[in-house]
Image: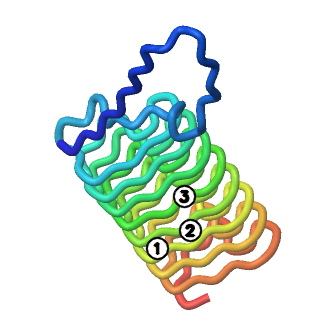
């Protein structure tokens, strides 16, 4: 496990100094015995991971992942994933996924997916997808989709879709 520890030792009792952001950040991969090349900032961010090359910023962001190459920014973003190569941005975005190559942006976007090559932008866009090569843009776009090669743009576009090549 890669660990970086920083210590500050100041013996002067009359000095006043200001901590920089670098001094205040916890730089330690505590709890990740199998994770390597991981950067985490936030309460329990990146905790209990076994994947590699992971970046997690936010409260419980990037928690309990086994896949590698994951980036999570936002509270609970990018957590409990077994697939790899995922970028999740937003509260509760991109978690509980086993699919790979996913980019999700928005609150609750890209949750519980098994498909690959998925892009979801918008509130709850791209949730519960089993299809491959799926792009959803808008509120609940491509929500509960099982078709392949689907593009949904707009309010609930491609929701509950079962047909491919849309």
Residue 131 is labelled as 1
Q: Nearer the viewer, mark 1 or mark 3?
A: 3
Q: Secondary structure at mark 3?
A: strand
Which residue occupies 56% across, 34% down?
Answer: 59
Q: Is residue 164 above or below residue 75?
A: below
| Residue, disc 2 | 145
Q: Quadrant of residue 69?
A: bottom left
Given residues 94 and 5, the one toward you in this image is: 5
Given residues 45 and 77, the one toward you in this image is: 45
Question: Are dots 2 and 1 in contact, CB under 8 Å?
Answer: yes
Residue 88 is labelled as 3
Q: Quadrant of residue 126?
A: bottom right
Q: Earlier in the sequence, mark 2 or mark 1?
A: 1
Rounded to the nearest whole Å, what is the CA distance between mark 3 and mark 2?
Answer: 19 Å
Rounded to the nearest whole Å, what is the CA distance between mark 2 and mark 1?
Answer: 6 Å
Which residue extends farthest top?
A: 13
Q: Earlier in the sequence, mark 1 or mark 3?
A: 3
Q: Is residue 3 above or below residue 15?
A: below
Q: Secondary structure at mark 2?
A: loop
Which residue occupies 40% across, 59% down?
Answer: 70
Point out residue 10 in the picture as x, y percentages from the top left corner.
44, 20
């Amino acid at each position: 496990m890669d660990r970086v520890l920083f210590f500050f030792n100041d013996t002067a009792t009359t000095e006043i100094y200001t901590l920089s952001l670098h001094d205040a950040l916890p730089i330690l991969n505590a709890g990740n015995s199998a994770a390597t090349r991981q950067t985490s900032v936030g309460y329990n961010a990146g905790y209990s991971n076994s994947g590699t090359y992971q970046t997690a910023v936010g409260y419980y962001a990037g928690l309990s992942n086994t896949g590698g190459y994951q980036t999570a920014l936002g509270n609970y973003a990018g957590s409990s994933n077994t697939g790899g190569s995922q970028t999740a941005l937003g509260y509760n975005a991109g978690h509980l996924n086993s699919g790979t190559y996913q980019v999700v942006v928005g609150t609750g976007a890209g949750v519980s997916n098994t498909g690959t090559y998925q892009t979801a932008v918008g509130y709850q866009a791209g949730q519960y997808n089993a299809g491959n090569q799926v792009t959803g843009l808008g509120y609940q776009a491509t929500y509960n989709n099982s078709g392949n090669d689907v593009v949904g743009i707009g309010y609930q576009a491609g929701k509950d879709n079962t047909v491919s090549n849309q």
